[in-house]
Image (tube, coloured by chain):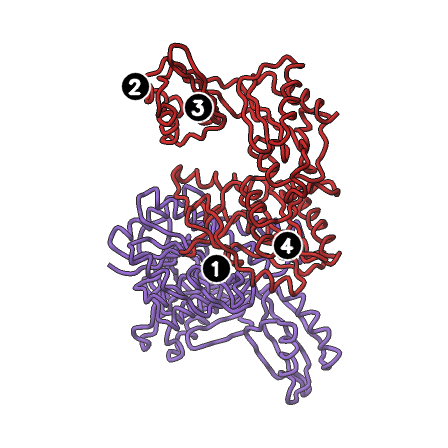
Chain colours: A red, B purple
Amino acid sequence: MALIVMKFGGSSVADAQKITRVAGIITDSWSEGNDVVVVLSAQGDTTDELLEKAAEITPDASKRELDMLLSTGEQISIALMAMALEKMGIPVISLLGWQIGLQTNSVYGKARIKSIKTERIQNELDKRRVVIVAGFQGINKYDDITTLGRGGSDTTAVAIAAKLNADLCKIYTDVEGVYTADPRIVPDAHKLNVITYDEMLELASLGAQVLNNRSVEMAKRYNVNLEVLSSYVRKPGTIVKEAANMEETKISGIAKDSNIARVALVGLKDEPGTAFKVFRQMAKYNIDIDIILQSIGRDNTKDISFTVAKPDVLRTKTALEELHSLLKFESYSIDDSVCKVSIVGAGMINSPGIAATMFEALYDARINIHMISTSEIKVSVLIDQKHGERAMKAIHEKFFS
Amino acid sequence: MALIVMKFGGSSVADAQKITRVAGIITDSWSEGNDVVVVLSAQGDTTDELLEKAAEITPDASKRELDMLLSTGEQISIALMAMALEKMGIPVISLLGWQIGLQTNSVYGKARIKSIKTERIQNELDKRRVVIVAGFQGINKYDDITTLGRGGSDTTAVAIAAKLNADLCKIYTDVEGVYTADPRIVPDAHKLNVITYDEMLELASLGAQVLNNRSVEMAKRYNVNLEVLSSYVRKPGTIVKEAANMEETKISGIAKDSNIARVALVGLKDEPGTAFKVFRQMAKYNIDIDIILQSIGRDNTKDISFTVAKPDVLRTKTALEELHSLLKFESYSIDDSVCKVSIVGAGMINSPGIAATMFEALYDARINIHMISTSEIKVSVLIDQKHGERAMKAIHEKFFS
């Protein structure tokens, strides 16, 4: 008997049939004697349909009224799920963000959770009811509805699990867990039984879209055990938790991110403050920078390369044009035919051989490396996009075969 | 400059175009300097669509979860209307039942309003914002969402108008006001400029579906001036208010109700308690009784006739079968080919000539009267349904030509 928080996404509750199937999963856990809190997203296309209704009226709706509109999506989901459980004879109650006192800051559209009152949820659990909570929503200090933005339902689930000291927070998705690499690219990829929060964070930010970073960060902060598993196949998924033994070096996965472009500034003056001025300019245009590489150029100049997300390429151009007139440099180029391939594993920094093994795999495959970046638990390389999938397979084979 | 509460029904906000048109009506009133509170129903078919979603899951959803589901309909309406007003540059805010502290009892599906906190609405009005309120919904003492049942949005509007001491509560509908008779049946029917609460109540209960009785009763109790008017044609409607001069006899309207059946019990024992036993049985089956007529039968027996609503006919049969074995009587019959035609007017009881004039009109038209019922402000007759429309025309001509 344990306290379990379960979260199901929009595709898992898209229609009556899917809701009934999910209700079966919930019922099984409850029938084993567990206390169960369920967090749901809006059904399938509901959010898009609501956005369309708004767009028919105005392209510039305030975020406050958009949140008022969009929060109905989760409300519909939880009411329908409660009905499905009622039909199965399970005691159940659905609750909205304001009903569980989920307080957020006042940033409509991407609010952050400040606190949750657990009294209501706890009272309902004490009556042995399954509690169905609307994800993605809360209220601010004005008693106005806010939404949590992308991955908001995951975050709701983790926050509730943290606050209730749940034994496990199960995030149901359309994949069976976290894989060593994307199985669509690397057929040999296998599912991991366990992964650390930090590894999960690196994988998520590297383009393995299984769990939203915000929710993993929160799980790490409050030490919430997560499980990522499939809502379609009933078998164990991947547990995300604190590292049991950080000494042991282990590669957990390989990820590829193609949503990236490389920017190169050539012939900058080699004097103090140059890098500062470049990245202050990027910050002014709100452009997130990933890998940075600085090298000595010809004739007492230096070159700076960095990567940006593809959607920021146009703004980067504007920023660099402006920079060019302020800060003399020879030229700049933006190349979006690149991708980033990374290996992730706890304790990697203490095992230099791991990076070497990765580079060896790429060398064997005759794939050129443009940039390299490392952190405590990952090694990333920038290569031509056309070699991306081949690189993943080569690295995977080297480490996992 | 006044405080105006406006209520628009589901068909007035059915799509983006209609919402924008209604936003124009609101804007005009606000621009004249009025403080404006708007109460909305769910868009067009939204409620039916939501009920269908529930029906796909279970035919027996709890009323608590149905209210959780259905209350999203009004939430969508108010968010969209707020967006339409934002687009016109009008300061606006949408508010849900719980946000205005609309407390109800705990009868899910047909809750009754207990109180409204006006602080939030008043604060927003003080900022010169148009306040858009979700009709039909409130919360009970458990902080759970309740819906007010049929005509709930009208009731919400009147309750807010009462609480805020509004100068006028305008109920926008798809008719131009209250008519002396249904214009589809009686082409000569004309719109009334003023009608009393009591006359309106009688007309509503007699099948003139303009305003819900609950809202008129509440308006009468709190002396809220109502106006029933069209959301399509911009002209004055019918004002509903306290009678200025109850001495003056005036027929305000003629109504027909075909949703009725006549029940006749023949050959009951003529002894004390017979009527009590009959109607206790009806009450046990939750059957509402309208007109009752008792007459002397043959051989020391009596006959009792009464009318019930057509949807109750099946239950009435069951009730009577059971009654037959308890309380010996000769036979019973149920005739649903009847209708009730009524004239309504304040002070009618003091003008016996009015009933006579009505009966004369029916006699002239050779229409037989089965039952008669009178109250302070109305006279109703039960006649064959096939004569209903002809009866209305004949009576209307007699009184209004």
- Quadrant of the rendering where the N terminus of chain B is positioned: bottom left
Going by the image, does B194 lie left or right of B363? left
Residue nearest the observer in this picture, B276 or A31 = A31
Label 4 and label 3 in one chain: yes
x, y percent for residue B51: 59, 52
Label 4 and label 1 in one chain: no
Q: Of helix, strand and loop, which one carries label 1? A: loop
Residue nearest the observer in this picture, A275 or B178 = A275
Per the rendering, the mark at residue B16 is none
Which amino acid is tagged 3? Val
Q: Name the residue under label 1.
A: B136
Which amino acid is tagged 1? Phe
Q: Name the residue under label 2.
A: A325
- The chain letter under disc 2 is A
Q: Of helix, strand and loop, which one carries label 3? A: helix
Q: Of helix, strand and loop, which one carries label 4? A: loop
Q: Name the residue under label 3.
A: A313
Among numbered discs 4 and 3, the one appearing first in the sequence: 4
x, y percent for residue A24: 72, 50
* Most distant residue in the bottom direction: B272
Which amino acid is tagged 2? Ser
Height in image: A93 above or below A354? below
Between marks 2 and 3, how big is the CA–CA gap? 19 Å
Between marks 4 and 3, how big is the CA–CA gap? 43 Å
Disc 2: CA contacts within 10 A as few (<14), some (14-19) or many (>=20): few
Disc 3: CA contacts within 10 A as few (<14), some (14-19) or many (>=20): many
**Badge 4 vs badge 1, beta-carbon distance below 8 Å:** no
Between marks 1 and 3, how big is the CA–CA gap? 49 Å
Q: Quadrant of residue A401?
A: top right
